[in-house]
Amino acid sequence: MNKRIHYYSRLTSPADRALIAPDHVLPAPDEIYVYSPLGTAFKVDSCTDGYGKNSSIVTIFMIWNTMMGTSILSIPWGIKQAGFTSGIILILLMGILTLYCCYRVVKSRKMIPLIDTSNWEFPDVCKYYFGSFGQWSSLLFSMVSLVGAMVVYWVLMSNFLFNTGRFIYNFVHDINVTDIVPGTNGSNKVICPSAAGGHSPQNRSVMLSSGNNTGFELFEEWWNKSQTVPFYLIAVLLPLLNLKSPSFFAKFNVLGTVSVVYLVFLVTVKAARLGIHLEYNWFTENDFFVPEFRILFPQLTGVLTLAFFIHNCVITLLQNNRNQENNVRDLSIAYFLVGLTYLYVGVIIFASFPSPPLSKECIEQVRYFTFCKKTSI
């Protein structure tokens, strides 16, 4: 019987369930055993209902953390480009629009008649509605967004690992590092690249060490941000990539929300110290005037399209939800949390940016903002 079932399963694709053995010819889940050559039998527990599935709270945080990325660092810059009021409105409208599109993607499988679509992925749905062109187009653009995200996160993880290693080395060897950065606002330094004539800020350092420089030069040679540290990440990540349990990665992914909570907490504390700086004087000329609307608002919508993008993998994420009837509810809650996080972080950073003495134009896009974050927020 086992060989016959395997033979039938290879005659068609996994999405076609025409030749799959019916349930009445298979033993009950609690009666399935695996017999070893030593004569012992092991009960298979993975066939029980709900095993390896995620609860609604895990699914919500998994979707939330999957959508949250480096886009959150660009939201304050996007609000500056779009204008304060129009930026808030655009975040709400884009969140609702992308949620509705994601809802249509989730419901698209259920609307296909006479075909079992329980094992279908997003490319399979695109192939049904748009043919081979839709299938390969969805795969192509999914790979483009995936490769882009991988490059960004690899760079970020390399920077974090490099800075962590350098901090530990400086702490152990009693090396004092003093950054020379263009800043203002007293002890709360805020980098303003545009104030330096449009050139990128130079993060020069003065190192005061009580020992010789031979060991430090050797450390700099083997702990290089672009030549060695990115390859050290392979030794850290390769064992994790060999794990086969998707449920483990789903639960491990939830830990990423800790960093989001920390960022929200950090932004709140910094905003409480810096205060709110918004100038709305419409009748007096002011260099620190905050416009309500700007013609550059499409730049914020472009950031938000990627910030709220999860449509190509939402079917896969929701397949592991233990309660399938709650998919729409869990998806809506996750989008609400993402939109609320973007709105809170973006508005608070923009409003608390010290203007005066600096102008809001000092808020730069992500290539500077990841650098400014360490000193401004």
Image: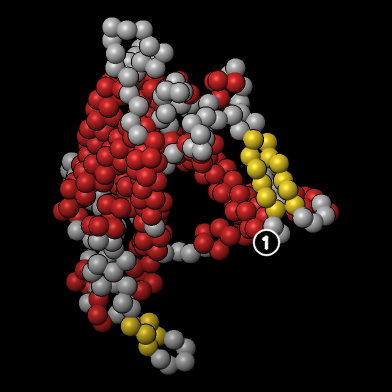
**Residue 151 position in % (x across, y down):** 55, 41
Query: Could you tell me which residue is drawn at 65 percent across and 52 percent down?
Result: 166
Instruction: Name the amino acid, label 1.
Output: Val
Estimate how packed mark 1 is, as few (under 14), some (14 to 19) or many (20 or more) residues with alpha carbons within 10 Å: few
Who is closer to the viewer here, 123 or 222?
A: 222
Q: Is residue 209 left or right of residue 2?
A: right
Q: Is disc 1 placed on a helix, strand or loop?
A: helix
Query: Could you tell me which residue is drawn at 70 percent across and 53 percent down?
Result: 175
In the rendered view, tell whether residue 310 sits above or below residue 228.
above
In the rendered view, tell whether residue 162 sits above or below residue 361.
below
Who is closer to the viewer here, 284 or 139?
A: 284
**Residue 9 position in % (x across, y down):** 36, 61
**Residue 17 position in % (x across, y down):** 28, 56
Who is closer to the viewer here, 237 or 188?
A: 188
Q: Is residue 79 left or right of residue 184?
A: left
Give the residue at mark 1. Answer: 172
Q: Is residue 138 visible?
A: no
- Colouring used for the render: secondary structure
Query: Could you tell me which residue is drawn at 59 percent across and 29 percent down?
Result: 182
Q: Quadrant of the N terminus?
A: bottom left
Quarter of image, res 300? top left
Q: Is residue 367 left or right of residue 327?
A: right
Query: Could you tell me which residue is drawn at 27 percent across and 39 percent down?
Result: 340
